[in-house]
Image: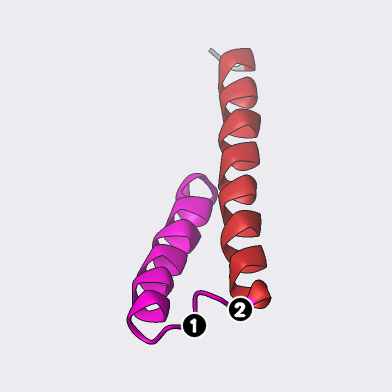
Amino acid sequence: MYAIYGPYVLLAAIAIALLVAVNRDLISTIQFRIMIIGTGAFALVWSVLLGTVWQEYR
């Protein structure tokens, strides 16, 4: 059950980090941008994967 919510918790943590980064002007760093894009892509791929598996067991 926790595998379903894992990427979303990670995405929420990154969103909070994004707010802190904007306030401290860290958003211009390439490393932070790569982290945000990578996390979003991971959450999207995980959602598609779970959606596919969910349809098979229905």
Q: Which residue is mark 2?
A: 29
- Judged by its main secondary structure, the magenta piece is helix
Say which element carries label 1.
loop
Q: Which residue is mark 1?
A: 26
At x 42%, y 79%, the residue is 21
Say which element carries label 2.
loop
Does 13 lie within the magenta span?
yes
Q: Is 55 left or right of 9, judged from the image as shown?
A: right
At x 40%, y 63%, the residue is 15
Q: Position of residue 32 (x, y in %)?
A: 59, 73
Q: CA distance from mark 1 to mark 2?
A: 6 Å
Which quadrant holds residue 31? bottom right
Does 10 lie within the magenta span?
yes
Q: Position of residue 54 (x, y in %)?
A: 56, 22
What residue span does the magenta drawing correspond to? 1-29
Q: Amino acid at mark 1?
A: Leu
Q: Amino acid at mark 2?
A: Thr
